[in-house]
Each structure stands twice: as C-alpha cells, then as structure tokens.
Amino acid sequence: MTRHFRTLRDLSRDELLALIERAIELKALRGEPSHPRPLQGKSVGILLEKSSTRTRISFEVGVYELGGLPITLKSGDIQLGRGETIEDSARMFSRFLHAVVFRTSTHERVLRLAANSTIPIINGLCDTHHPTQLLADLQTVQENLGHLEGMRVAWVGDGNNMANSWIEASSLLGFELVLAVPPGYEPDAEVLKAAEQSARGQVRVLTGPGSVDEAIRDSDVVTTDVWVSMGQEGEQGQRNAAFLDFMVDARRMKLAKRDAIFLHCLPAHRGEEVAAEVIDGPWSRVWDEAENRLHAQKALLEFLVP
Ligand code: CP
Ligand code: NVA
C-alpha cells in the first residue's frame, strides 16, 4: 500500500519518533562514505504552487544526497497550471516519478493528488498544514532538550498551518501545547477537535488578555510564525492590527524556562512576530531548525519511498 505524508497523522507515534531518531543519525552520516543512497535510480518531483526557499533546497539536496534525481516543477511551467486536472497530473507523475512533494493552497488539493497517485505524496505546505517543518522542529527540540515527551511548547500568533501541525504533533506525542492567538485567528476547528478526542491531547488555546505571557511562562519551547501567510497578502492591514501585541521579545522569553529555546520556521519578519533580540539572540535555534529540514526529510524519503 502506498504511504503518503499528507499530515502528521499519517504517521503513528512510534513511526514519528523513529523518523526523528533516524534524522539525527543521517545528520551525523552526512558526507560519510557509509551515508545511504536508497533513491539510487529514482526521481522525486518537487511541485510548487507557492514560493519556497527552504523546502525546495532541502528536498533537492536531500534527494541528491540519497542518490536520486530531484525535479522541481513550478506549476506555472507545467500543464497543471493551464488546467490539466490534478487527477490526470497524479496519474502522469506516478508513471515517471517515485514520489512527489507538493506545496499548494488548499489541503483538498493535496488529498486529490494523493488519492490518484500510486507513489508517495508529501505535503510540502498547504494552507492548513506544514508537516515536514514539524519533523525538523521536533528534531531540533530533541537535539536541544534531549526529549520530546513531558515538554511544554508555547505557540504565539496566528492559528495557521504551522499551528495546526504543532497541534497534531502534540496529540501524537503527548506534550503540552499552549497557543496564544487573537480572537478570530484560532487554529482549524477540525484539527482542534481531533486533538481533543485524542488520548494524549494536551492542547489549550488562549485568546484573552495576557494570553501571550501565560502561554510562554515556564515553557521549554517558544515558537511563532508570520502574521500574513502566503495567499493572505490582501489581509495585511487587518492582520497587522490584530497581532500588534503578539511579538515574541526578550521580556517574554525571560518568562519561559531558563534554558528555553526559540523556533521559527522562517521566513521571519523582525519587529513583527519576533524581535531581533530573540531571533538573533541566545534562545534562537532557527538556523539549526532550517538545516534540520534536510536531515528530517531524508529520513522521511527513506521511510516512504519503496
Ligand atoms: N519554512 C519553510 O517552509 O520555508 P520556505 O517557505 O522557504 O520553503
Ligand atoms: N505560515 C507560513 C509558513 C511559511 C513557511 C505560510 O504559509 O506562508
């Protein structure tokens, strides 16, 4: 049966933990003669309907280092961008390629591509999920804290694709996640409902005054993201107003545990969601986090591609 990675929920808890462990191993093996090459003779499409720096480069380099051929396709350059259906595109990709990474708008487009593919489809970000980023984030936490279970994570800002994927990670692994979001910018209702129903769920969403400080207090990890995600450019003005008091600054980081770390999937806007003193300061692990995209996605490809 073809395994896809549409959201984190496509993995079991044990599979997720094993992938993170493997990502750390692959990081240590990088450049060594014993580094595995399971994609030798295989090709992976990287299909982009939105901009990307990290996802594109980390998948291209990762596929290459695993011995395969990465083929980046901007949807405007292929027939999909001229109206060929997702279903027919999926059938074509399945005849030529061994996996496809898909960055798109609605999650429904990811589901349709996967439903019509006989090769693994990896969600490289959609409007409601960013699961490959979470693999790297969890790896970074594991490397810094030495554990994932029992930790407390604070999410500050928009209840967006990254927030939803953090919620799914919390449900799978059972760590405490407290999200401080402005009213009207809560995470996806279905993702929250699934988290509430999960046996391990420990997710709280705070929207009242003082919620940012409350979320960050005593946390091990503080994380945030842009106020305006790709595709929301028309909402810039109202979003800037709604998120005015949601910047992660040094005063707030000092409320977290003494050895707390700061994560951000990048790209970042200094002076908006994060102060320069935080992203460029001692708490920040954002550059390791970005590098870990490479290692974590190699572990994912090794696991998914038969
Ligand atoms: N974090 C992330 O996905 O970055 P890109 O948009 O540059 O791929
Ligand atoms: N939430 C952001 C993440 C970018 C990697 C976006 O969707 O634009």
Image: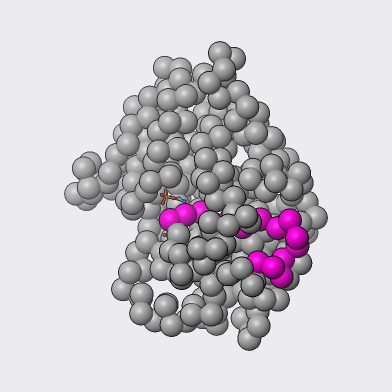
Residue closest to the eye, 248 or 154: 248
Residue bounds of the magenta highlight: 253-267
* Residue 104 horizontal/vertical position (percent): 37, 53
Which residue is the extreme one toward the top? 33
Magenta stretch contains residue 43: no
Residue closest to the eye, 14 or 133: 133
Residue at image coords 40%, 59%:
106
* Residue 198 horizontal/vertical position (percent): 73, 60
* Residue 263 horizontal/vertical position (percent): 58, 55
Corner quadrant of residue 14 = top right
Whether residue 2 is visible, yes or no, is no
Residue at image coords 73%, 56%:
259
When the figure is inspected, residue 280 is found, relative to residue 64, above or below; the finding is below
Residue closest to the eye, 95 or 69: 69
When the figure is inspected, residue 142 is found, relative to residue 43, above or below; the finding is below
Magenta stretch contains residue 260: yes
Residue 296 lies left or right of residue 62; in this view the side is: right
Whether residue 180 is visible, yes or no, is yes
Give the main secondary structure of the magenta stretch. loop
